Image (tube, coloured by chain):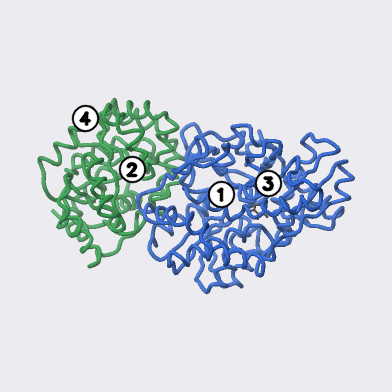
Chain colours: A blue, B green
Amino acid sequence: MISISEEGYYGRFGGAFIPEMLHPNVEEIRKTYVEMIQDEVFQKQFRQLLRDYVGRPTPLFLAERLSEKYQTNIYLKREDLCHTGAHKVNNTIGQILLAQRLGKKRIIAETGAGQHGVATATVCALMGLPCVVYMGAVDIERQQPNVSRMKMLGAEVRPATSGSQTLKDATNEAIRDWINHPEDTHYIIGSVVGPHPYPDMVARFQSVISEEIKWQLEAATGKSNPDLIIACVGGGSNAAGAFYHYLNEKEVRLIAVEASGLGVDSGESAATSVLGTEGIIHGSRTLLMQTPDGQIIEPYSISAGLDYPGIGPMHAHLIQSGRAEAVHITDQEALNAAYDLSKREGIIPALETAHAFAALDKIEYKKTDVIVINLSGRGDKDLDTYIKHLG
Amino acid sequence: MSRLKNTFSNKKANLLNVYFTAGFPALEDTETIIRSLAESGVDVIEVGMPYSDPMADGPTIQQSGMKALENGMSVSVLFDQLKKIRKEVETPLILMGYFNQMMQFGETDFLARCQEVGIDGLILPDLPLSVYENEYQDLFKQYDLAPIFLITPQTSEERIRKIDQLSQGFIYVVSSAAITGNSKEISPEQVAYFERIEKMNLRLPRMIGFGISDHQSFSTACQYADGAIIGSAFIRALENGNDDLNHTIKTFVKGIRNN
Ligand SMILES: Cc1ncc(COP(=O)(O)O)c(C=O)c1O
């Protein structure tokens, strides 16, 4: 059974390793979120926004030409068709409602690819709340379109200039901001990372993905369970959402795809499940890339959303316990998969998502298998990178 | 830990705790800094283990930590340095760092080594009270180390009572909702908070830290607690000082005490 304990542990991973300054805030969320999610009024509001604002349910699309290439049956869960262009908004809708319930007046967020920043800026505009987004200076450079979108939506984008100037450092800055503004501010974390209850809360908001896959697949094939689900993993929120309702259905193989950058052993990688060891990052006990002395190693991936040295505690547990299989995809393999998907199905995926598609070349499956790939986001934000590498 | 207890039973007011980042400005400065601080009459010395991702620290301490890591500082190098200087200095030494550093060293090995090199207490801001209580309390006792926990303006009374029970040595009173290194004047709201804590008649002495940067803020803080802790301001003094570290340090401490 995959489940989370009262203290927020999946097996040995999780918990809330936070400084005292954050204790009251995190405790308040812990006491509120389950009750809120089970509350009818919340559910009605959440579902309505997901339908009328986000555009859910997102389609489950049978990708015939891709299926033909791989000689199997491939369905794409079209999270790229969500408002703002990625799954991230499922979570920000849930968390903005939480912030309102807690009476918070200011929102902060971290972002890597900028998708979570855009999704946060969007719900803040919708609810009329001021929004500050922390983004690594390197990511601001490589995800310019999303920086412009956030600004147009009224958010302030603050560069994180410490460390590798990517997602990890943006997260540190957001945490520091929260410590400085404990009373009026809610921190919308963008993935299934951070102290308990964030990983569980974000997973629950994203679980709408697999909830829909179940009935959509049933309608399409007569069976609600696929044989495999493939999703890319940065912190792991789109994967958590796609896996959620299948976690305890053992016959469904769960494939978690990490970015290996220039190669797992190149020293320029973000393949946390192999390069990581158990430790604490951003308030959670999980697998992370670190030196023997416990210093966090700066990761590398061409994809800003996967360029993170940790992995959500749920995924650390799924992978270590053997429930999920980890696959590693290099920059070049991801780029090739993105070019191929674009020409073959007319869909330009986000660079993050492209890693999930590249995994088709790495795993074993049968001709009769039904495979669902979570198409977590669209690639508009990555056009510069795609064009540059097209050669 | 007895050094820490004695310090607080011998002196009841105006205790000065100075924080520095080990390995900054240079790798081998640890001994000089500790010796100079001790000779200047600092009551407690807090040694920071530099960390790549110090989430409770502001830019000054972050940057000193980055420099220290570049200089080659590590937990084991630091332990070796401390073991040497402990032979000369009787001032209580407290180690400050992040829980992951203790975890990677091996929790038991880490605590045993702390005792061996003469550490008196530990501040690990991201080690939660409940995890300490359930998993590490016995080990801290076994190795005679004082766990020092933080309280903030938002900490509930019930929780402060619990922290007072579980901590040893002193309670770290974080002066405002902030990371380290914000130095502003002490506000009336802060004074109200210090007074509220004072009236609780806690078992342990209280040291006020975060944002204490000069003689003025130090003496204000000392009116409401047993003493105060200075970190970022000292790091800045080291940065701006000349090559004579000993002189810089003595001048700094003198300026804080104003004597
Ligand atoms: C489209 C897309 N997919 C995946 C990710 C990775 O995040 P997660 O692992 O939380 O889904 C991101 C992050 O920015 C993203 O934008």
The CA span between labels 4 and 1 is 49 Å
Q: Is mark 3 within 8 Å of ligand 1?
A: yes
Circle 2 chain: B
Dot 3 alpha-carbon crowd within 10 angstroms: few under 14, some 14 to 19, many 20 or more: many
Circle 1 chain: A
Give the percent coordinates (x, y) of residue A356: 73, 46
Report helix, strand or loop for mark 3.
Answer: strand
Q: Are marks 3 and 1 in contact (CB under 8 Å)?
A: no
Residue position for label 1: A192
- Counting residues from the start of the chain, the first of labels 3 and 1 encountered is 1
Residue position for label 2: B129
Q: Amino acid at mark 4?
A: Glu
Q: Nearer the viewer, residue A86 or A370?
A: A370
- Counting residues from the start of the chain, the first of labels 4 and 2 encountered is 4
Dot 1 alpha-carbon crowd within 10 angstroms: few under 14, some 14 to 19, many 20 or more: many
Residue position for label 4: B88
Q: Nearer the viewer, residue B86 or A222?
A: A222
